[in-house]
Image (cartoon, rainbow, N blue to C red):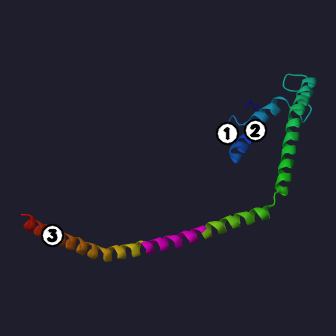
């Protein structure tokens, strides 16, 4: 940025530090544009005639005003959407959603406890069946051994 007045340059540097604006920021480009083409005072730009300042002013107005109008329109549209949004019903939906999740979590805990109890009952039943099945297998082995012995004697 070319600012020949040291006082203005010092103010700009202070402004940069205060608002943490880096070199190359668009705000500095705007200051540079204003420095080269002083639009507010109506004076002519450095080395130019007053009509070119008016042309630049007019060009900025024609390019900035539509952009400003778009921003205003978009902000009004956003405001309309925010006012039409029924936050109370939205909050109720979220609360109902959370209540549903809490209900499902509690039901899942109940199912888990019931499945743990069922697993314990199955383990107890298996523990009580094991001696019976072992005894039955031993008895069948003994009976088949005796029958085999008898058949071996009878057929021999």
Which numbered disc, 1 or 3, marks the residue that appears first in the sequence? 1
Q: Which residue is mark 2?
A: 27
Callout 1 crowding tier (Cα within 10 Å): few <14, some 14–19, many ≥20: few
Callout 2 crowding tier (Cα within 10 Å): few <14, some 14–19, many ≥20: few
CA distance for labels 1 and 2:
9 Å
Q: Position of residue 90 (x, y in %)?
A: 76, 61
Point out the image quarter for the C terminus.
Answer: bottom left
- Magenta residues, start to end: 104-118
Q: Residue at x 71, y 46 (%)?
A: 19
Q: Residue at x 39, y 73 (%)?
A: 122
Q: Residue at x 71, y 37 (%)?
A: 25
Q: Which residue is mark 1?
A: 22
Residue 13 seen = yes
Q: Position of residue 28 (x, y in %)?
A: 74, 36
- Label 3 element class: helix
Q: Position of residue 33 (x, y in %)?
A: 80, 31
Q: Position of residue 85 (x, y in %)?
A: 81, 57
């Amino acid at each position: 940025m070319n600012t020949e007045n040291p006082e203005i340059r010092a103010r700009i540097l202070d402004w940069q530090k205060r608002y943490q604006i880096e070199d190359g920021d668009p705000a500095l480009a705007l200051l540079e544009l204003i420095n080269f083409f002083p639009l507010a005072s109506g004076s002519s730009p450095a080395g130019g005639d007053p009509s070119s300042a008016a042309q630049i002013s007019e060009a900025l107005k024609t390019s900035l005003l539509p952009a400003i109008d778009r921003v205003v329109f978009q902000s009004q549209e956003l405001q309309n959407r925010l006012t039409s949004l029924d936050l109370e019903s939205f909050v109720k939906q979220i609360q109902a959603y959370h209540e549903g999740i809490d209900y499902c979590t509690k039901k899942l805990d109940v199912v888990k406890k019931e499945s743990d109890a069922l697993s314990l009952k199955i383990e107890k039943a298996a523990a009580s069946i094991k001696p019976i099945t072992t005894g039955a297998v031993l008895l069948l082995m003994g009976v088949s051994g005796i029958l085999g012995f008898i058949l071996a004697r009878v057929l021999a």
